Amino acid sequence: MEKHGLQMRYDAVILANGTFPKAEQPLRMLREAAFLCCCDGAAARVERADCVVGDGDSLPPELKARLADRFIQVDEQEDNDLTKATRHCLALGFRRLLYLGATGGREDHTLGNIALMVEYRRRFGIAPTMMTDHGTFTPHRGDAVLQSFAGQQVSLFNFGCTVFEGRGLRYPVRPFDNWWQGTLNEATGTSFSLHADGDYLVFRSFLDKQGRGPADPPRHTAYLALGTNMGKRDDLLRRAVDLIDEHVGRVVRRSSVVETEPWGFRSENKFLNMALAVETALSPRQLLETTQAIERRLGRTKKSVGGRYSDRPIDIDILLYDDLHVDEPDLKIPHPLMHEREFVMRPLGEILSPNGSSYSSRAPSARS
């Protein structure tokens, strides 16, 4: 995902055997891929491939022999090679996947591959990105706040929503009956938000109508506190960190995880707490809206009001934002209660210090 120059980090890149990328954005992602998985004949177009997945029908025999130690042959024909490669990457533990070269061939294949992004979200629970020479396709469900730039071309494709609304776009959003109805919209600022009751696909262009891209926005450092005392706590923290990295900005430092007693109310469920430092282009208000959307996505249905606290699957608080002071009814920075909370100050102290631990995508583990 393009995030105003804050590049989404992908666990793996899957190169399909469609039209090979020509634009700088996808070519850069190909060069910088931490792990490259090729769909069959796509391996003939690159100098290196970490694995090749498919039935081998479009792989030249000499190349197939040379890549024998990395070729994963899957003969079943129920799924296409893109899905076979996806399953293989998931089996290796990769979840943040970028797809290149999946368009530009036969039109029916192009439409099918684009629609698979929604299918992968539904079937595998991942948030894949398909990048073309012109922009990105990303599947979403429910509410989302997406980074953009003024004039960015945006198209929305409905996959069964009966409620579909948008803010920050030039034209109204509704539960479109046909795909063409949601095309050719336009972002009016640095982000737009969508409210829906189901699945949908978003295309965002690299350039506006005049062929101009986004100017590099100012980068800010925000410090966030995360806590959870319900469900699979380790998993909820990991998912929250991944969503923050995807939708807020690059996580540059993270604390260790501490286990603490509930604060302000009684409960048998202990909390896991941690803190993050994030580089973001979002304003404080956009940051609040985005973190609240992440909370809702992870199962939180209501915020604490009037000092009444309760068990919650996830809690994300904004502690600091550069040196800015904000005093609004629903947004106060620095967080007015953080100095009273050891479970906040202890993790925050780790990442404010010069030796704060750097970001890792590994799932957190509690320590007492």
Image (cartoon, rainbow, N blue to C red):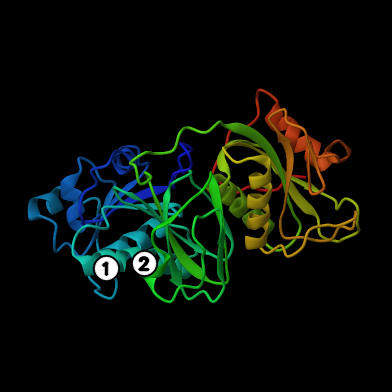
- Percent across and percent down for residue 262 are 85, 53
User: Is 328 above or below relative to 97?
Assistant: above
**Outermost residue, top direction?**
354
- Percent across and percent down for residue 321 are 69, 34
Counting residues from the start of the chain, the first of labels 2 and 1 encountered is: 1
Quarter of the C terminus within the rendering: top right
Dividing the picture into quadrants, the one containing residue 71 is bottom left
In this rendering, does residue 74 appear at all?
A: no
- Percent across and percent down for residue 325 are 77, 33
Q: Is residue 83 left or right of residue 248?
A: left
Residue shown at 72% from the left, 60% from the top: 313
Of tags 2 and 1, which is closer to the observer? 2
Which residue carries the number 2 mark?
A: 116
Q: Nearer the viewer, residue 129 or 148?
A: 148
Which residue carries the number 1 mark?
A: 80
- Percent across and percent down for residue 141 are 53, 65
In this rendering, does residue 301 appear at all?
A: yes
Query: Tag 2, which secondary structure?
Result: helix
Task: Residue type at mark 1: give it.
Answer: Asn
User: Is 2 above or below relative to 305?
Assistant: above
Tag count: 2
- Asked if the residue under mark 1 is in contact with the one under mark 2, i.e. CB atoms within 8 Å, the reply is yes
